[in-house]
Amino acid sequence: EAGVVQSPRYKIIEKKQPVAFWCNPISGHNTLYWYRQNLGQGPELLIRYENEEAVDDSQLPKDRFSAERLKGVDSTLKIQPAELGDSAVYLCASSSLLAGTNNEQFFGPGTRLTVL
Amino acid sequence: GENVEQHPSTLSVQEGDSAVIKCTYSDSASNYFPWYKQELGKRPQLIIDIRSNVGEKKDQRIAVTLNKTAKHFSLHITETQPEDSAVYFCAAKSTARQLTFGSGTQLTVLP
């Protein structure tokens, strides 16, 4: 079974440019998460989806960040315009609400964003 | 919201020795405590977890203990091996809220 897939793996852009990240969760996982991980720190939740509904986006900087999960499967996270402080690894994770799964979150490999 | 503190930030042990990483949490409603291992440049992977109705859980060389009264939990790795070297993150989750991660511990196992 394929794990969580993310692309691109690396992205280098200049400040003020837009950037988008894509995530394909594990098949059947209805919950999808976007995290940001700064160097030397733990992941911080940006947004959580239950199917196509964003149920927790309190930590998403809505002035420049947006996300969507139109069909309840794949998701995209966009930053426009990017700032120097946005340099980080953006992790996508997914989990299942089925009984016995413990809601374990499976992480993708992440997208390492560098803003110059 | 939840606040998770993790100590130490770095830990070096000799191969074969034990390693202990400790975390505290603030939200008494938290009931799920996973530990993730993240190797350099790779994704975090769950290595063990514990729920609040259990005080201790063991899986081969790793174990986790939970003290709900004191709101702290610990990861114990015995007979450490060089491949145990990685960053370890604790996390806490309540039913209504999401995972809050600690700041990580860089474990180095010296051969």
Image (tube, rainbow, N blue to C red):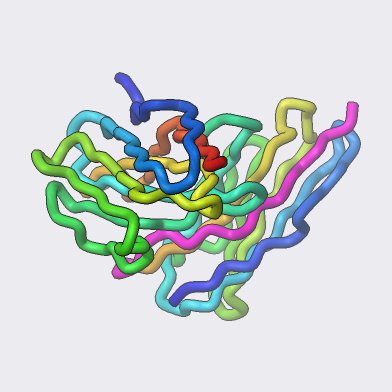
Q: Toward the viewer: A5 or A113?
A: A113
Q: Toward the viewer: B32 or B56?
A: B32
Q: Is residue B28 above or below residue A66?
A: below
Q: Which quadrant holds the C terminus of chain B?
A: top right
> Residue A85 at what x, y percent from top left?
54, 54
Q: Which quadrant holds the N terminus of chain B?
A: bottom left
Q: Is residue A22 above or below residue B27?
A: above
**Magenta includes B35?**
no
Instruction: Locate residue A75: give its quadrant.
Output: top left
Q: In this view, does B52 lie above or below A43?
A: below
Boundaries of the magenta span:
B95-111
Q: Which residue is drawn at 78% across and 47% down?
A: B19
Res. B50 visible in picture = no
Q: In this view, does A31 lie to the left or right of B44?
A: left
Res. A54 visible in picture = yes
> Residue A104 at what x, y percent from top left?
37, 45
Q: In this view, does A40 lie above or below B99?
A: above
